[in-house]
């Protein structure tokens, strides 16, 4: 089955990935696989024997001309290994022999952009976290809802997420004790077990 050039490009790229994980394929009159790897001259000289055993390369030799593809090449930093699909012969070229090759190689193989320094600084900066709690106080004769604000400590964002549950639980305990003390002071006869406090964090602020 004859495939179109774009399908050939995708197949070539997929076929290269197991050997060159960062490989990219480009197709025009030539199908160029940029390997993003530096094997060295000796290893490159050994590649034709391996390529001749590859089924995808065999298909290119048979059908490449019908798709308008004249050659298949593997690109390395300074060297290109080219297979002429009409003669079935390999040759090693200097990367300087191909126009704009250095630009194509740089675009395909450049490392991922560095993380934003400002974002890194923000992630590593310790800040004060404040929790806003809604406390529902149930007594024998009435129920009231009050808002309480408590500091949750000084943390970096990542450390806060790891310690959030512990800090919230500690503040809930403090809130319960505070409301229990207030009720006891106002009503000396109040039975402690009649007091129930539910404290849940409604928001967190830096």
Image (cartoon, helix red, strand yellow):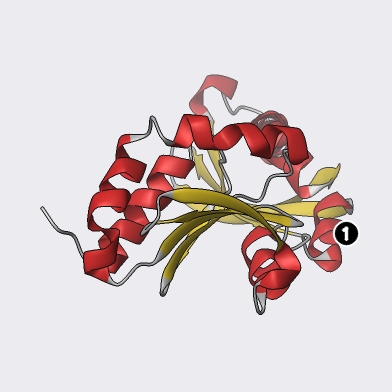
Q: Residue 175, image x and y in percent?
A: 69, 38
Q: Residue 144, image x and y in percent?
A: 50, 52
What residue did someone put label 1 on?
121
Camera sees residue 127: yes
Residue in the image at 21% along x and 66% along y? 66
Q: Return the residue found at the far left.
A: 1
Dot 1 alpha-carbon crowd within 10 angstroms: few under 14, some 14 to 19, many 20 or more: few
Q: Quadrant of residue 203?
A: bottom right
Q: Quadrant of residue 78?
A: bottom right
Comparing 150 with 102, the one in front is 102
Residue in the image at 26% along x and 60% along y? 7
Q: Please tell me whether mark 1 sits on a helix, a strand or a loop.
A: helix
Q: Residue 151, image x and y in percent?
A: 80, 48
Residue in the image at 30% along x and 36% along y? 55
Comparing 173 with 41, the one in front is 41
Residue in the image at 74% along x and 33% along y? 42
Q: Residue 8, image x and y in percent?
A: 30, 58
Q: Quadrant of residue 173?
A: top right
């Amino acid at each position: 089955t004859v495939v179109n050039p774009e399908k050939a490009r995708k197949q070539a790229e997929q076929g290269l990935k197991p050997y060159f994980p960062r490989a990219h394929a480009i197709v025009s009159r030539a199908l160029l696989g940029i390997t993003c790897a530096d094997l060295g001259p000796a290893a490159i000289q050994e590649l034709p024997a391996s390529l001749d055993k590859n089924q995808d390369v065999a298909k290119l030799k048979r059908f490449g001309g019908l798709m308008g593809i004249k050659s298949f090449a593997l690109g390395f930093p300074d060297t290109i290994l080219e297979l002429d699909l009409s003669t079935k012969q390999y040759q090693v070229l200097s990367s300087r022999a191909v126009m704009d090759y250095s630009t194509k190689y740089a675009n395909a193989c450049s490392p991922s952009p560095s993380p934003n320094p400002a974002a890194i600084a923000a992630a590593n900066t310790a800040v004060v976290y404040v929790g806003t709690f809604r406390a529902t106080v149930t007594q024998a004769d009435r129920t009231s809802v009050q808002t309480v604000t408590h500091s949750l400590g000084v943390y970096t964002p990542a450390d806060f997420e790891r310690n959030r549950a512990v800090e919230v639980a500690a503040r809930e305990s403090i809130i319960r004790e505070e409301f229990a003390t207030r009720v006891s002071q106002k009503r000396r006869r109040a039975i402690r077990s009649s007091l129930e406090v539910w404290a849940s964090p409604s928001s967190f602020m830096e």
